[in-house]
Amino acid sequence: MASIPTTSLETFRKHVYSPLAVINGLYGEHKSDKDEISGHDNEFGKAVKNHFKSVFSSPEALERIPVFDRSGHSTRHKNGTLVRFRCMVQDPSYGEELHLSVAHLVNSETGEVKQKFSQYTDADHVLDEGWEVDYSSSSNVFTEKEVAYCVSVPGQSEWAQLGTAVAPLESAFESMSVSSEPKITDASVDISAAIQAKYPLRSMKHSAALVKFYSPNTAPKVLSVIDVVGIYELGYNPKEQNDDSSQGTWPCIHSIYHTSVSLDCLVPGLPKPAAADYTSRRSMCLAHLASVLGGDELAAQYLLLHLLSKTVAVQDAKVGKFSLNLIGFPNSDKDQMHPATFSLGNPSTQWVASALSQLVPRSVEIPFDLKLLNNSSFAPNAELGDLQAGVLQLPFDTQLVCDETCLHEGTLDERGVRNLQALQTAILDQTVTYTYPYQPIDMPSNLRVLILSTGKSILQNDCGLYLSSPAIQFLSTIKGNDTPELKPLDPMHTEQLRQYLEYVRHMEFNVPQDVSDAISSEYAELRREAHKSGGKMMTQAELALTVTVARLLSISKGESELSLDSWKEACSLERSRAERNDKNKATNKK
């Protein structure tokens, strides 16, 4: 990693450890007036944003900003210092706040007047002796800020998390006096229960903060995944109704700027793949997935299509979703279970889930353990005014790996039934219902759901496939730490596969009219032939599935529109899948 030039050391130190002083200096240079800093046209806010973005424009500089993460915010960060937070907007309903960002001051002894700037903090103006705020002055400027509750990105893969460079530079800074405030020892104890209730995967370690967005940067929508660069400060939760004396202190981050987490953030430094690269990367990905599944190339084909699936709205319909049920995994023993936790206890299903987490930026494991199903809440709920998270309140494109092999005998209570119904709705409709005081609201979810089971899943899904006998035998050999050897991918190839999956998944795609007409004609002809021969006719559902498979096949090759070759290949794949499934069903009936 390239090092930061020594000439920037002092500048960097000031911006990280004294950002408010830097901003105050910028304000003096900018000579802002009331019109420039108020309202949605906050010119000074734009100037601050652009200044900090220029200072931290390189990936190396960004990595030097301390990360607000799972390591524990209450002891690591000092009030008034710069932090980075990669987060999901869990609850944007904290409303707006007004803050006296520019105060008109008067010296009661000399009559002298001046302005004092105090934005990006909730602290009251600290005044020198003899000075006081003239609240009747028209020169006072109140800044509007939007507040959202943000959490660590649920299910974020380790490779997709923010990293902080470890270098002698930080060691030198640690010895500096950067704050006169006493060290906060355990500020979050009183609010720990509330923090857990607002995280989708309860009991899992995470960080949370109230992020405050200043004009002209509005708060992102719920489920947005963003990188925030802002000023850390302990404050109070505006939704708490207690007196200030009994309120817990909450971590707050005053956003200087935020960016959406793009592919370039997740796989930095790689050039955009050329058209010729997609074929080789597709082959590499299929070979890797086949090795994960014990050499089952057909299952690898369908798993790749699943990983590339993405629901998109076309007129009044949703197309592109492709939930997948892989059938044939060995049952898990009860002593392998991790009750009521979001981790898989079955070594064979964990093997697959771990392999996928190395390729996708977000992956959540849901074991169908009765205790977890009965004690969790899959749907978010805001009936009491504060949005309590549900397991399915996850960012778009999150990979769900559901393990049915751990569903043993027992009683599924009313909550467990509701949870399975919520998951079923997410699979079929790609929506999650948020319960609000007056009416429920169906929110789009766009989750990829992979179900691993011994027999056919209890949940309706888009596509089911029995694993081959060699694959089942291979998976049955995976026992705890004694796992078979998976040929590792080198770091460069791993990054290339991550980039490949993300790029092709988000490609613009369309179906040419001539291809659509050809498919319609073929479908009609197949039904006529089946009617004449008395054979089974292709249903509308089967046609839609085959078109989805063809669409995903084209996408996997880096093609921006459906081709007839992909349609023919999809028909062949679907025949192979049907033959294997029919064979397994016949065997199971014996």
Image: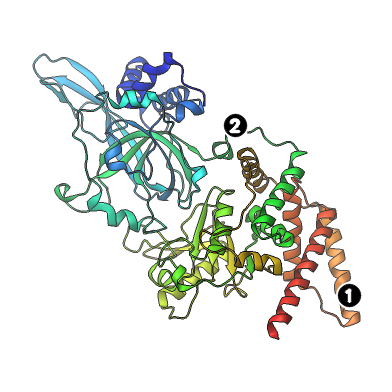
Look at 53% across and 57% down and name the residue there.
445
- Residue displayed at 48% across by 55% down: 394
Mark 2, other Cα within 10 Å: few <14 / some 14–19 / many ≥20: few
Q: Position of residue 342 (x, y in %)?
A: 44, 61
Q: Which mark is residue 528?
A: 1
- Element type at marker 2? loop
**Between disc 2 and disc 1, whose residue precedes?**
2
In the image, 275: left or right of 161? right
Q: Identify the residue at horizontal 85%, vertical 74% (top origin).
A: 527
Q: Residue furthest left?
A: 109
- Quarter of the picture holding the C terminus: bottom right
Residue indicated by mark 2: 269
Residue 283 image point, x, y percent: 74, 48
Q: How many marks?
A: 2
Q: Is residue 314 visible?
A: no
Q: Is residue 494 above or below residue 7?
A: below
Name the colouring of the figure.
rainbow
346 lies left or right of 540: left
Q: Position of residue 333 (x, y in %)?
A: 49, 72
Q: Which mark is residue 98?
A: none
Say if 124 sits above or below 430 in the image. above
Q: Image point 43% across, 39% down: which residue?
A: 218
